[in-house]
Amino acid sequence: MVKLMRMLITRPEPDAQATQERLAALEIAADIVPLMTRQTLRAHLPPAEGFSALALTSSNALRALSELDAAADLRDKPVYAVGDRTAHEARQLGFNHVIAADGTLDSLVTTIALARLDGPVFYPAGKHLSGDLAHALAPHGLMVVTTPVYEMVAETALPKTIAGQLAAGNFDAILFYSRRTAEIFCALGASAIPEPARRKLPVICLSENVAAPLIEHHFSRVLLADHPSEDAMMALALAFAREQTGP
């Protein structure tokens, strides 16, 4: 009898649900444990007319702008999105001129720098930044106005059912999409898994940066996506499942 794969998704909603559905289409079962929840901040946004473009490093910024009723004022601005997923969501919200970088902050910096913009860039961001876009673009002569519009609030405990399943070794792999999520998981969940089991439990990570906290907590079976995208994560999950169970 072929053993069915079962994985754990750690990313926030609504992205976790989308990942679960994509895994199901690949015949991989998955549970969801969102380790952060998005909260829109009461942001005082600068006037849109003062900017030459909009920079986005997360779809969460678009969701926050919509909840702040601020997206409409910005739709005539060129949008520089960190990757294809964020670019797609920008187009869904009615932004017409959307340019996608290659999925990393460095690629976004390069894409914006090559555009030779003639004015400041507006960057609606999260409260907890993993990189400094303004600092990175300053050598290119570009001013970036960063306004936090959302916060990803960390959970304070794992659900008992998930902690119990982790302790029992019921998951074949865990998916991680951000370094902060990995850090939260290590703080809340690593102790539920005996160290010998941690060394054997595969963790599927978007990048080396995401994997770093897991490696520090003795998760030794690290699988890295070959590109920081959902498509690459799904390809990696499928390849792993086939390796374990056969095609």
Image: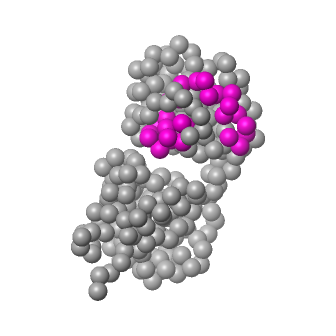
User: Which residue is painted at 53% across and 61% down in the image?
Assistant: 17
> In the picture provided, is 17 more to the left or to the right than 223?
right
User: Which residue is painted at 38% across and 47% down in the image?
Assistant: 228
- Location of residue 192 in the rendering, given as x and y in whole percent from the top left corner: 50, 76
Magenta run includes residue 61? no
Relative to residue 219, is residue 194 depicted above or below?
below
Relative to residue 224, is residue 188 depicted above or below?
below
- Location of residue 9 in the rendering, given as x and y in whole percent from the top left corner: 48, 64
Quadrant in which the N terminus appears: bottom left
Residue at the bottom extreme, as displayed: 1
> In the picture provided, is 26 more to the left or to the right than 146?
left
- Location of residue 234 in the rendering, given as x and y in whole percent from the top left corner: 37, 58
> In the picture provided, is 244 more to the left or to the right than 139?
left
Relative to residue 227, is residue 111 depicted above or below?
above
User: Which residue is painted at 47% across and 44% down in the image?
Assistant: 85
Relative to residue 169, is residue 112 depicted above or below?
above
Magenta run includes residue 69? yes
Q: Which residues are magenta?
A: 66-91
Quadrant in which the C terminus appears: bottom left
How many numbered circles does the render carry? 0
Q: Quadrant of residue 91?
A: top right
Residue at the top extreme, as displayed: 118
Q: Which of these two is toward me, 237 or 96?
A: 96
Q: Is residue 219 visible?
A: no
Q: Is residue 247 visible?
A: yes
- Location of residue 118 in the rendering, given as x and y in whole percent from the top left corner: 53, 13
The type of colouring in the image is one colour
Q: Which of these two is toward me, 169 or 209?
A: 169
User: Which residue is painted at 62% across and 28% down in the image?
Assistant: 75
